[in-house]
Amino acid sequence: MCGIIGYIGNREAQAILFNCMSRLEYRGYDSCGIAIGGKNIHSIKNKGRVIELQENAPRIEGTLGIGHTRWATHGTPNAVNAHPHFDCHGKIAVVHNGIITNYLQLIRKLKNKGHEFVSETDSELIPHLIEEYYCGDLQDAVEKALDEIEGTLAIIVLKEDIEELIASRRNSPLVIGIAENEVFVASDVPAIVEFTNKIVYLEDGDTARISKDKIRIKRNEVTITPVINEINVTKTEIEKNGFDHFMLKEIREEPEIIEQSLDMLTNEKNIDEYRQVIREVSDISIIGCGTSYHAGLVGKYIIEEALGIPVRVELASELNHRHRMIIPDLTIAITQSGETADVLVPLKKLHQCQAHTTVITNVYGSTASRISDSVLYTHAGPEISVAATKTFIAQLLELYKITFYSSIIDTDSRMYAHKELMCISEKVKQMLENDVQFQRCGEFLSEHNEVFFIGRGINFPIALEGALKLKEISYIHAEGYAGGEIKHGPFALLDENTPVIALLTRDGTRDAMISNIKEIQARKSPVIVISDSQDKDIDGITDAVITVPQVPYLFSPIVNTIAVQLIAYYGAKFKGCPIDNPRNLAKTVTVE
Ligand code: F6R
């Protein structure tokens, strides 16, 4: 969940580290720190955001250093618990992303040997352990220390008087970026894309010894030649480009993402990839967390309706603790980041059982992509805002494609779906132009403390997603419910101060939904209907109507999602919340 960065080159490290750390903040932003190497190591750290540290920092000279943005796991966010952490003599500095599970035992052992600890973190033991093993070769000491550590980690190590960085990863992401006489190490590519597009992906267990003109990677005791990938993320993709927030920019990118996703279908090789995913299978399981889980729930409706194959959707975080794992013919894991620990654990178990897995992810080279039988990349570009928006739409597109391009669907259904999907991006563009209706709704919700979202059928997951989005960025308590379920308990909470957002679609659920809306109105709750048509059926039973374009029922989650994303965005904006970095959250959740 934390972000780590390392730099070695000819330029002043301090400014570069701060720049990269500000791009890593979406991974954690409760405290941060840097250490600059050279003859001695100088470090500054603080509670709060990178910009605050940067504005108050003295100039530290040096052309190599490490930095960290933290999402607290062990110990409250403060300057002492912030990274980098040091050994007893302040000669070895370490930044760490991950969790050490045997930390109590290791700290006890180190204390018995005379090591003194200043923080409440698990990470602090790493430099102390390296110090114990150090006999003139830093890489060797790091490797020996890592042999004793259990848990997840990505680390970068800096030692005084040594012009090298040592980096290593185990179940936490780490990439190396190479430029002319300078090298970057980072938790992800967007952090360093301004400086280089030449990327080396480290694998689990790798240790890299890095100087400004040489990288030596040790994998399974052998030094390997690094494979350099030229990636095509541009700086504009990681800038706000005039938008107030990344979240709005990312929602506005959705029509283009839909177009790009469908463009993939003009290439026979890509189509073949989709044909291969669902073939002769008798059952499918979809796993994911949070927003990705909601995409999975939509996937169930799409696949079951179009292909008639039963689909079980599981919260990956729950699956991890089952005594018995039921293995389906195909498991589809959905994870935007590809690094969510709750998804990786069952995925690894499935892999060990030789179960067939496909991953839908947005991050090239992510851990999930490397432990599955096949990968579908969503190609949504970097998503910086903590709340997932465009990646959710891109995940839905992948689910439509694997269904309607599967080798078992009939040609008519495929052609119909293709034709309809091709029209959606234009409709979404028009909908985005009529922004005022979402702003008004957001403003109204911002004045309330409790909100319900309801939907039926394929739009029930969108009610869940709307509630999740609103609560995470506006801190308004929101619940998503199936339209028919709200009378089975939640009715007790309804009153004139509890708005209900109802998703109403022209499909088989419409009449039942209208009845639900009337029942809610009778309890005096304000009802705002998101509808694909405005007619006499809903006259007089709603307080406001938000219109979305009419699309076939199976594709309605796309337009309804964008509507609830915008409502949540404006709700948070009217409340003045820090939309892109909500409190307590982080984009990539690498702890269970
Ligand atoms: C909500 C959100 C989270 C993620 C969840 C899973 O806006 O982003 O609920 O969906 O943490 O993350 P991934 O998809 O990276 O596995």
Image (cartoon, helix red, strand yellow):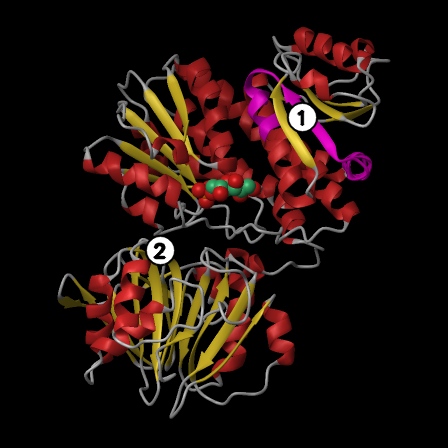
Residue 562 placement (x, y as % from top left): 64, 35
Residue 307 placement (x, y as % from top left): 39, 15
In terms of secondary structure, where does tag 1 sit? Answer: strand
Magenta-highlighted residues: 436-464
Numbered circle sitting on residue 172: 2
Classify 10 Å Cα crowding around label 2: few (below 14), some (14-19), many (20 and above): many
Asked if residue 422 is positioned above or below residue 264 in the image, the reply reads above
Picture mark count: 2
Q: Amino acid at mark 1?
A: Phe
Q: Would residue 378 be visible to someone looking at this image?
A: no
Who is closer to the viewer here, 426 or 185?
185
Classify 10 Å Cα crowding around label 1: few (below 14), some (14-19), many (20 and above): many
State the image quarter where residue 556 is shown. top right
Q: Say if the magenta span includes residue 443.
A: yes
Q: Quadrant of the N terminus?
A: bottom left
Rounded to the nearest angstrom, the CA distance separating label 2 from label 1 is 35 Å
Q: Amino acid at mark 2?
A: Ser
In terms of secondary structure, where does tag 2 sit? Answer: loop
Mark 2 or 1, nearer chain start = 2
Who is closer to the viewer here, 308 or 444?
444
Asked if residue 104 is positioned above or below residue 210 in the image, the reply reads above
Numbered circle sitting on residue 453: 1
- Seen at 82% across and 38% down, the residue is 447
Single out the residue that lies furthest toward the bottom: 39
56 vs 497, left or right, is left
State the image quarter where residue 99 is shown. bottom left
Q: Quadrant of the C terminus?
A: top left
Asked if residue 485 is positioned above or below residue 387 in the image, the reply reads above
Circles 2 and 1 in contact, beta carbons < 8 Å: no
